[in-house]
Image: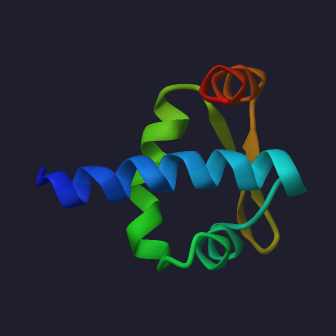
Amino acid sequence: MSAQASALHDRLRREILQALQRRGAALPIELAALTLSFVDEIRPVLEELEAEGLIELRNVRGGPLVALTARGREQLRRLS
């Protein structure tokens, strides 16, 4: 991964976690809008965050709903 791609990835991770903390659960398209990104750009980041247990994806009528986990909140406390 290039330095530029790595910086974007790190920014998206942080901004997604912060957005979920501020506003609560959200659809991926909402998170993309909040991070000024496309859904395809944040999808790998969401998969990574879910694998790490920082977020959880729940299927709801409108699609997958992304929610911050307790572990995700703890990660944000460490980043601040």
**Outermost right residue:** 23
Drawn side of residue 43 relative to residue 69, left or right:
left
In the rendering, at what x and y percent does residue 46 appear?
51, 50
Image x and y of residue 66, in percent: 71, 52
Q: Is residue 30 above or below residue 65?
A: below
Q: Residue furthest left?
A: 2
Nearer the observer, 72 or 11: 11
Residue 75 in the image: above or below residue 16: above
Whether residue 68 appears in this view of the structure is: yes
Give me the residue at 35% from left, 59% from top. Answer: 8
**Towards the viewer: 47 or 77:** 77
Between residues 1 and 25, which one lies in front from this camera angle? 1
Q: Position of residue 57 (x, y in %)?
A: 67, 47
Query: Residue at 72% of width from left, 67% of height from top?
Result: 27
Q: Residue 19 is drawn in which quadrant?
A: bottom right
Q: Position of residue 9 (x, y in %)?
A: 36, 53
Can the viewer see residue 58?
Answer: no
Which residue is depicted at the point 63% across and 67% down? 28
58 relative to 14 in the view: left or right: right
Which of the 4 image quarters holds residue 15? bottom right
Outermost front residue: 80
Rendering colour mode: rainbow
Q: Is residue 64 left or right of residue 45?
A: right
Q: Quadrant of the C terminus?
A: top right
Quarter location, residue 17: top right
Left of 79 or right of it: where is 68?
A: right
Number of dots carrying numbers: 0
